[in-house]
Amino acid sequence: MIIRKFEAAVKEFDKCHDGKGVLLCTEMLAEYQRKEPGVKFYHDNILQPGDSIGEHLHKDDEEVYIIIEGTGIMKVDGKEERVQSGDVCITRKGHSHSLVNTGKTPMHFLVVGVVLQKAGY
């Protein structure tokens, strides 16, 4: 499967997971109801300075955040860590996370959501 960015839907998520501001998201893959193992979604995101993705729990999936540009604070299970270009954050099943852009420029990052096994196991 080839997914071309120029063909992908661009969406704005206002107050993503009860965060602040607008998350600009190029939605390259969006199989949100997926229950079997595999990639659930792939997003190419922009978060403006001061904006955030609110803290949320991952029950049946995991997420990988790849910071392309910018700086911020990623909170995983209540512990805050600075993140910057080149950093990767993995939030495992059963854990929570949030992200805030603390920099002076837009933060560019990729997110891949994965279902590891059938939900409920």
Image (spheres, grey):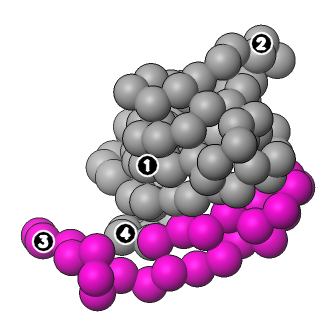
Q: Residues within 10 Å of mark 3 (few under 14, many from 20)?
A: few
Q: Which residue is mark 4?
A: 29
Q: Which residue is mark 1?
A: 110
Question: Is residue 74 visible in the rendered structure shown here?
Answer: yes
Q: Label 1 amino acid?
A: Leu
Looking at the rendering, in which quadrant would you find the N terminus? bottom left
Disc marking residue 2? 3
Mark closer to the chain start, 4 or 3: 3
Q: Which residue is mark 2?
A: 79
Q: What count of labels does the image hold? A: 4
Circles 3, 2 touching at the beta carbon (< 8 Å): no
Q: Which residues are magenta?
A: 1-26
Name which quarter of the figure residue 59 lies in. Answer: top right
Does 10 sit above or below residue 65?
below
Q: Nearer the viewer, mark 2 or mark 4?
A: 2
Secondary element at tag 1:
strand
Q: CA distance from mark 3 to mark 1?
A: 17 Å
Question: Is residue 98 visible in the rendered structure shown here?
Answer: no
Disc marking residue 93? none
Front-most of residues 98 and 63: 98
Front-most of residues 84 and 81: 84
Q: Label 4 amino acid?
A: Leu
Circles 3, 1 touching at the beta carbon (< 8 Å): no
Left/right of residue 21 with respect to residue 91 in the rendered view: right
Say which residue appears at 71% left-offset and 71% top-offset. 13
Q: Position of residue 22 (x, y in %)?
A: 76, 67
